[in-house]
Image (cartoon, rainbow, N blue to C red):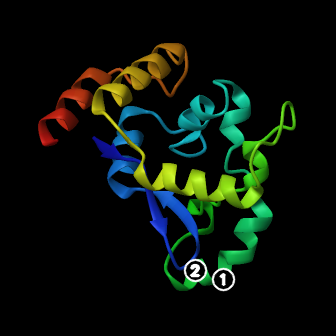
Amino acid sequence: MIKIFKYIDELDCFIVDPKYKTIANSLGLTEWNEVVWIGRFFCLDNDYGEHWFDNWSQRDAIESKASQLGIAYDDLLVLDADRFENGYDGPCHTAEDRLLFWKDVLISLSLSFDTLVREARIFNEERKEDEDYLTDLEERISAIRSTL
């Protein structure tokens, strides 16, 4: 199992776990960050999920402290309780409860290498005509698998 996020207690936010980041980049799972595809699953499997960490004002608020810790602004992933409710038939929980829940979920989130590989193959097939297509994806998969 591969841990996806690393929680930064001093900032009350996340970054992508370095090991997962390396694997995701090698497998072509990165769009504007390595967890966009995961957000889609969490947000009813649609493109709204790719924006689950679009919360620039919250990043701005911790940018200075993050910089002091050596963490780049673009690496900050701050939970925003409002992104996890749509008012359709609720909300059923307070913003504070949603934040606590999602923080727990992301701290504990690990995915199997097989899940990552499956998604990488799907992404790569969709990019077959693009410059981002990985002709050596299967070799990359084998190389990573041998190190796990």
Q: Is residue 8 left or right of residue 36?
A: left
Residue appearing at x 31%, y 33% in the figure: 112
Q: Residues within 10 Å of mark 2 (few under 14, many from 20)?
A: few
Residue appearing at x 61%, y 61% in the figure: 74
Identify the residue position indicated by label 1 in the image.
64
Residue appearing at x 50%, y 55% in the figure: 104
Residue appearing at x 41%, y 25% in the figure: 120
- Which residue is farthest front? 92
C-beta proximity under 8 Å, tags 2 and 1: yes
Q: Is residue 109 left or right of residue 141?
A: right
- Quarter that holds the N terminus: top left
| Type of the residue with mark 2 | Ser
Spot occupied by residue 33 in the image (x, y as percentages of width and height): 56, 46
Closer-to-camera residue (98/79): 98
| Type of the residue with mark 1 | Ser
Identify the residue position indicated by label 2 in the image.
67
Disc 2 and disc 1: Cα gap in Å? Answer: 5 Å
Task: Give the secondary structure at mark 2.
Answer: helix
Q: Is residue 17 left or right of residue 76?
A: left
Examine the rendered structure and indicate whether residue 135 appears above or below residue 39. above
Closer-to-camera residue (127/49): 49
Q: Residues within 10 Å of mark 1 (few under 14, many from 20)?
A: some
Asked if one can make out residue 55 in the rendered structure from this viewpoint, the answer is no
Task: Give the secondary structure at mark 1.
Answer: helix
